[in-house]
Image: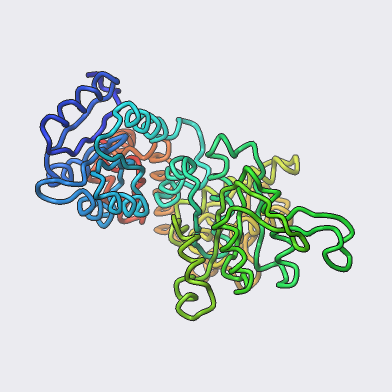
Amino acid sequence: MSAGQTRLCLVEDDEIMGESLCDRFELEGYACDWHKTAASALASLGRKEYAVAISDIRLPDLSGDAMFARLLESGAALPPFIFITGFGSIDTAVSLLKQGAADYVTKPFDLDLMMEKIRALAASARPSPGIKPGLGLSAAMRRIADMLPRLALHASTILIMGESGVGKEKVALELHNSDPKSAAKPFIAVNCGAITESLMEAELFGYEKGAYTGADRTKRGVFEQADGGTLFLDEIGEMPLAMQVKLLRVIQERSIVRVGGEAPIPVNLRLVCATHRNLKQMVEQGTFREDLFYRINVIQLRIPPLRERKEDILWFADLFLEQYAARHGVKKKFLHPNAELALLDYPWPGNVRELKHAIERAYILNNNETLMAENLFEDGLFPTSLAAVPEADLSQYLQACERRYIVNALNHHQWHMGNTATALGISRKNLWEKTKKLEIQADIKGINGD
């Protein structure tokens, strides 16, 4: 077995099935650690790096779903999970998918089909060296990025939750582009909160010529425009109750009727909804339909606010500096260390959108090549902890430098803790202590790397 072999984790107590699966994995070129109990698997998943984990749901000491729940609660970085289940446990498997499992197979399963799933997951388990992550460096955003190719294989309606400006539309677009079948088709984004109630039905479903005064031509609505691709309904919580009924019918029937029309028009698309509001609470208050909530909440993705994923702040800032320079054909500006500290210290109530606007404003209003902290914030918004000191104190400055250096090293080594510690010339234990002290989230792919 070569040192560079992709390693799988198998959790299966049945001797015959375990041996046959291990044999097949080795024939396919994979290394495999076979665990016959959940306890053994829990210990191994906490210290080794695996491309994919394959687990039976029925285990002698602890069920597969209970084991998965413990792993999630521990905050450990997990590989994609495929669960093996009997027909009677399909509900459990579906529940596991909603919790973040990659897929499941039912007994008796097609081994060739399982291998296809494993190969696909293993191939996408680690980003290619030198490729910048599309959604951010933080563990939370890498976890979402890793899920998108798997979600793209299914046509389930997806609900994206998160504060305004966190990047919900960006995640929806990445999902759209993750599906080769839909990537070449339209991606249509609509803000439900920006359309008046009187015009919403016509905007969503279109209208026939003569349907009302001023309708001098037939117009396709966004559902028809997105046919074959993805329709992103942002701020779904702002949709009036009367329109919620009509949207529910469209989701159920997969067809629309234009305003002033009679014939149903079939539509085949992926529907992604998003909101910054608590839809469950709105259901309890009677301002959002319960049946629609369950229809759109098949799979839910929560995007944390930027203040909870500080690893992404400087990465996004550098990305926006590059984008602005490229778009306007000017020389790229750079952030002074004091500016970096200010960016990390600010809570970003407007999230990524606010950060982008701050970078663009600083670019426009400052002629210097290096942007200072005061260039990034309007009056009254400058972080108070840094406002009184032009360069911040030495302790803050050194801590920020150390933090950024470690994050860059982790990113360079694809968040493999062992390789990063070696490159930094420190022990894994020391690296772990520093990531905890500096509030660096452990990345989902590499915290168990040896």
The image's colouring method is rainbow
Dividing the image into 4 quarters, which one contains the C terminus? top left
Is residue 440 left or right of 343 when viewed as pictured? left
Please tell me whether residue 140 is drawn above or below residue 134 in the rendered image: below
- In the rendered image, residue 190, in percent from the top left (x then y), is placed at 66, 58
Residue that sits furthest to the front in the current view: 262
Seen at 84% across and 67% down, the residue is 212
Residue 372 visible, this angle: no
- Is 279 situated above or below 222? below
Q: Residue at x 26, y 18 (%)?
A: 27
- Closer to the camera, 309 or 149? 149
Q: Up-down: is 133 above or below 96?
A: above
Name the image quarter holding the N terminus.
top left
Percent position of residue 271, x then y: 56, 53
Locate residue 49, reporting x and y percent.
Answer: 27, 37
Instruction: Give coordinates of residue 403: x percent, y percent.
Output: 40, 50
Query: Which residue is depicted at the point 55% across and 60% down?
Result: 274
Is residue 85 positioned above or below 158 on the image?
A: above
Left or right: residue 112 versus residue 334 is left
Q: Identify the residue shown where x is 23% and y is 38%.
A: 48
**Taking the image as drawn, is residue 157 in sight?**
yes
Disc tally is 0
Q: Is residue 259 left or right of residue 346?
A: right
Taking depth in this image into account, of 180 and 292 the one nearest to the observer is 292
